[in-house]
């Protein structure tokens, strides 16, 4: 094909070309995982054709494998430009030197400001050579021809800077989701030309909290649907690599109840073509397979400026954004490390107004604000020297109050600890001092419920086979009415209460089984007279709406270690402590603060048989009912420990 036959090896025998800016948008080849590639204010195809020349290269890595790279260079050669690089497993199409993307860069601002944009298919995907490996582990020690994602990025940048004419010697990277992982991986032993990087919703740890697992619990619909297409083999470079899966029903609850043993899904549904599904099933604890894929441990002594971006309602990589920021902060206390958290679903910041999600409005065009006031100035300064470096450590959208806030650190330095303590008759007390256990009282105080895996609590009132992005702030009234969900709530608040930072669940529980999942949800209960939307095409009633603010699961057998599973002793009070990802949310005066505790969250989380065994190999007969208790007596005070910016 025209422009594709050039072998880029050490800069010899190739035509020198001009700059390109890397895309922060992921091609949405796979539902639910990538950010859409159509920002509201895209430059448009004609603009790109008029102002940029496209070139295609196969850039040789140190082991000889060639990676397909599309480069868009400004036609204006009166000045030099920085390079923006985006590395993706989702395709850098359209392929062909005469086929152009209709938009360039993380946003339309970049294409119109002038950058060189480089898009690359990562090793083993689409038109690149080599063998693909999911979240390829970083090699701490490697020989001259041994590779990882860091070396592939290093070699790519070295070639671009040496061979793309008109570049100013500075490179930026950005990417959302899986490309966010590749951006983070580039920060480990980075090329000196890499001056600024923005890992956005990056994959950080696939067992602890991203995508497929939360605290060891399996996020079933996301893993199933993503791997049904993405997980198929690609034996050789290709321009076509999309598989569709027919669930045969619009009812996700029913589909996943009938799925059968998880270990058999590859044979039953994927024709034994999805190797990674079998790896998921084979590595049911946080073993070396998963530990080696934890990018956080390598983010030390990071040299480039970093802008990590995440969404409070990102159903896929909320954990990754927060934890990549924290890892860089720990390893680089004096570095240029920044965090942005907005009221967004996965990649929502990169497209459209992002003024609402589901039924919840934000009364603010948060997408344009982020793109214009935060992201674009960050790269302009670090790659062009335009503007000033004055940006806060954390730029955070406070949901509930619907306003942007800035902080000198995250969690905020001024935040103070409080506790949400479970009390009798479903009361929730906001305590200024977390309770401490005392000697056992004469009588136990507890609440209990029966958990039946045959009738699990749904995560939405109506479920489809795909993981719904809006579940993270959806109405929880249907759940609070079930007998297998414990509900604790405050009286109507007399003044605003703002939670800011991670939430620590401190539960004292018992079960008649030998394993159980523990799901904790923090909910904002609207007043009964809360106004409905106007217009209101869906007819939703917002009075009494129970908005999920944050929910998280802990697979009980991993309560003490993700690497070592251990059973419960039936009937024995047991501590289950875990971290619920950060929030920045204000419960307004007149609202109630609610906590829900349950043991199933289906099909978002796969069912726990409530017996201590390999859940992935569990047969239908292994799933049993169990009675769970949550204690709230002085000896065992179950509560959530939070950080607040309020006084009361």
Image (cartoon, rainbow, N blue to C red):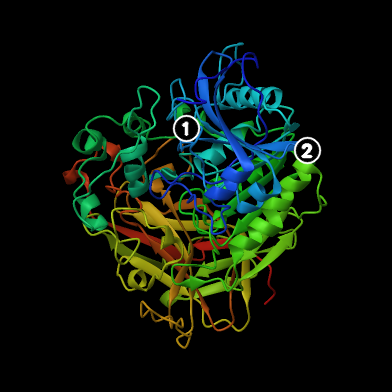
2 and 1 marks in contact (CB < 8 Å): no
Quadrant in the picture for the C terminus: bottom right
Q: Residue furthest left?
A: 621
Q: Position of residue 370 (x, y in %)?
A: 64, 58
Does 473 appear above or below 565?
below
Does 313 appear above or below 25?
below
Q: Evaluate whether residue 584 shows in this view.
A: no
Query: What residue did someone put label 1 on?
Result: 96
Of residues 422 and 237, the one nearer the viewer is 237
Q: Secondary structure at mark 2?
A: loop
Q: Position of residue 437 (x, y in %)?
A: 55, 60
Disc nearer the start of the sequence (2/1): 2
In the displayed structure image, the side of residue 365 where residue 376 appears, left or right: right
- Residue neighbourhood size for the residue with mark 2, other residues' Cα within 10 Å, grouped as few (<14), some (14–19), many (≥20): few
Q: Evaluate whether residue 157 shows in this view.
A: yes
- The residue that appears at 54% across and 13% down in the rendered structure is 63
Q: Position of residue 604 (x, y in %)?
A: 35, 53
- The residue that appears at 55% across and 49% down in the rendered structure is 46
Of residues 373 and 435, the one nearer the viewer is 373
Quadrant in the picture for the N terminus: top left
Q: How many marks?
A: 2
């Amino acid at each position: 094909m025209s422009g594709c036959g050039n072998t880029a090896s050490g800069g010899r025998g190739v035509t020198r070309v001009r700059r390109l800016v890397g895309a922060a948008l992921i091609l949405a080849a796979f539902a639910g995982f990538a950010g859409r590639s159509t920002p509201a204010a895209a430059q448009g195809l004609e603009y790109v054709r008029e102002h940029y020349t496209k070139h295609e290269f196969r850039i040789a890595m140190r082991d000889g494998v060639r990676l397909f790279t599309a480069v868009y260079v400004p036609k204006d050669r009166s000045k030099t430009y920085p390079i923006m690089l985006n590395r993706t497993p989702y395709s850098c199409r359209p392929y062909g030197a005469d086929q152009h993307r209709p938009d360039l860069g993380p946003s339309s601002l970049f294409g119109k400001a002038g950058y060189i944009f480089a898009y690359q298919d990562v090793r083993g995907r689409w038109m690149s050579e080599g063998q693909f490996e999911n979240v390829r582990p970083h090699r701490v020690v490697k020989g001259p021809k041994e590779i990882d994602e860091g070396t592939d990025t290093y070699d790519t940048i070295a070639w671009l800077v040496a061979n793309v004419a008109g570049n100013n010697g500075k490179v930026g990277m950005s990417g959302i989701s899986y490309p966010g992982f590749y951006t983070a991986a580039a920060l480990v032993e980075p090329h000196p030309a890499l001056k600024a990087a923005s890992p956005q919703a990056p994959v950080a740890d696939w067992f602890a909290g991203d995508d497929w697992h939360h605290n060891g619990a399996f996020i079933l619909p996301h893993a199933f649907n993503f791997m049904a297409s993405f997980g198929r083999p690609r034996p050789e470079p290709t321009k076509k690599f999309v598989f569709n899966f027919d669930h045969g029903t619009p009812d996700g609850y029913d589909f996943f109840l009938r799925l059968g043993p998880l270990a058999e899904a590859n044979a039953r549904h994927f024709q034994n073509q999805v190797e990674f599904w079998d790896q998921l099933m084979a590595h049911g604890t946080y073993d070396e397979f998963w530990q080696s894929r934890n990018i956080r441990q390598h983010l030390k002594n990071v040299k480039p400026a970093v802008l990590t971006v995440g969404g409070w309602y990102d159903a896929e990589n909320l954990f990754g954004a927060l934890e990549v920021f924290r890892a860089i902060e720990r390893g680089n206390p004096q570095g240029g490390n920044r965090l942005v958290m907005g009221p967004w679903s996965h990649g929502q910041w990169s497209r459209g107004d992002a003024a609402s999600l589901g039924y919840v409005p934000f009364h603010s065009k948060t997408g344009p604000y982020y793109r214009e006031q935060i992201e674009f100035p960050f790269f302009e300064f670090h790659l062009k020297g335009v503007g000033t470096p004055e940006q806060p450590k954390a730029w955070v959208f406070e949901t509930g109050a619907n306003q942007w806030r800035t902080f000198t650190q995250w969690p905020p330095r001024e935040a103070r600890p409080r506790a949400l303590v479970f009390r009798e008759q479903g009361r929730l007390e906001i305590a200024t001092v977390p309770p401490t256990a005392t000697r056992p009282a004469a009588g136990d105080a507890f609440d209990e419920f029966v958990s039946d895996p045959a009738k699990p609590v749904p995560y939405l009132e109506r479920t489809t086979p795909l993981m719904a992005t809006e579940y993270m702030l959806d109405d929880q009234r249907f759940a609070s009415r079930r007998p297998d969900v414990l509900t604790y709530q405050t009286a109507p608040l007399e003044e605003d209460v703002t939670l800011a930072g991670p939430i620590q669940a401190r539960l004292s529980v018992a079960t008649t089984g030998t394993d159980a999942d523990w799901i904790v949800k923090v909910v904002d209960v609207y007043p009964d007279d809360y106004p409905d939307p106007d217009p209101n095409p869906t007819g939703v009633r917002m009075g009494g709406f129970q908005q999920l603010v944050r929910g998280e699961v802990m697979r009980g057998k991993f309560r003490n270690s993700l690497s070592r599973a251990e059973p419960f002793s039936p009937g024995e009070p047991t501590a289950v402590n875990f971290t619920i990802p950060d929030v920045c949310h204000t419960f307004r005066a007149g609202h109630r603060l609610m906590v829900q505790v349950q043991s199933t969250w289906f099909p978002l989380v796969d069912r726990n048989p409530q017996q201590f065994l390999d859940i992935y190999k569990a047969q239908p007969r292994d799933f049993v009912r169990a009675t769970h208790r949550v204690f709230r007596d002085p000896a065992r005070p179950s509560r959530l420990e939070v950080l607040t910016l309020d006084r009361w």
